[in-house]
Image (cartoon, rainbow, N blue to C red):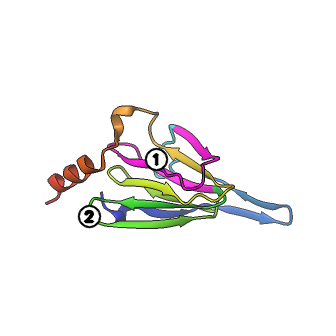
Amino acid sequence: MSLSDCKLIDFPTVCDSRGNLIFIEEKKHVPFEIKRVYYLCDVASGSKRGGHSHKEMRQIVIALSGSFNAVLDDGVKRQSVFLNNPHHGIYIPPGIWRELSDFSSNAVALVLASTPYDERDYERDYDAYRKMKQSNSP
């Protein structure tokens, strides 16, 4: 997978005088069946989350509140996506290194995941990740 496979997904929004209602349906707005939902909150100033890639898991990361950067890396290129709006999220396929950083004081990051937690699905060593990506490139 490469960074071009990472996509910003806009979620349907119903707006009226009472506020906005945003909804997400698996296999319709999310390109996978949702097997796990988790969120990050109260992240200390200057802290980073993530710092890994997945072998199989696909994810969508959404800033429900506040803001943060999602730094994505495919072993060749890096890009940063600023998330600060619950109306959309970033789709991250397997094989993409990700780090979340620069959390605002009220940030809540929601993650929709395609698999239950399995430590064997994680690559947490960036040097090993880069070597694996280089050995898989044509």
Taking the spot 59% from the left edge, 49% from the top edge, the residue there is: 110
**Residue 25 visible:** no
Q: Of 27 and 22, which appears nearest the observer?
A: 22
Residue 38 in picture, x, y percent from top left:
57, 41
Magenta span of residues: 36-63
Look at the picture and state if 2 lies above or below 124. Answer: below
Q: Position of residue 132 (x, y in %)?
A: 20, 49
Foreground pick, 110 / 40: 40
Q: Is residue 52 magenta?
A: yes
Specify few, some or many for label 2: CA neighbours under 10 Å numbering under 14, 14-19, or 20 or more: few
Q: Residue furthest right?
A: 17
Residue 37 appears left or right of 92: right
Examine the residues drawn in magenta and state their main secondary structure. Answer: strand
Is 1 drawn above or below residue 35 in the view shown? below
Q: Where is residue 108 shown, x and y percent of the image?
A: 64, 51
Which residue lies under the disc numbered 2? 76
Disc 2 residue type (three-letter): Val
Q: Which tag, 1 or 2, sits closer to the chain's start?
A: 1
The residue located at (44%, 54%) in the rendering is 99
The image quarter containing residue 54 is: top left
Tell me whether circle 1 and circle 2 mark residues in contact (CB < 8 Å): no
Kindly identify the residue that appears in the image at 17 percent across and 53 percent down. Answer: 136
Residue that mark 1 sits on? 32
The local secondary structure at tag 1 comes to loop
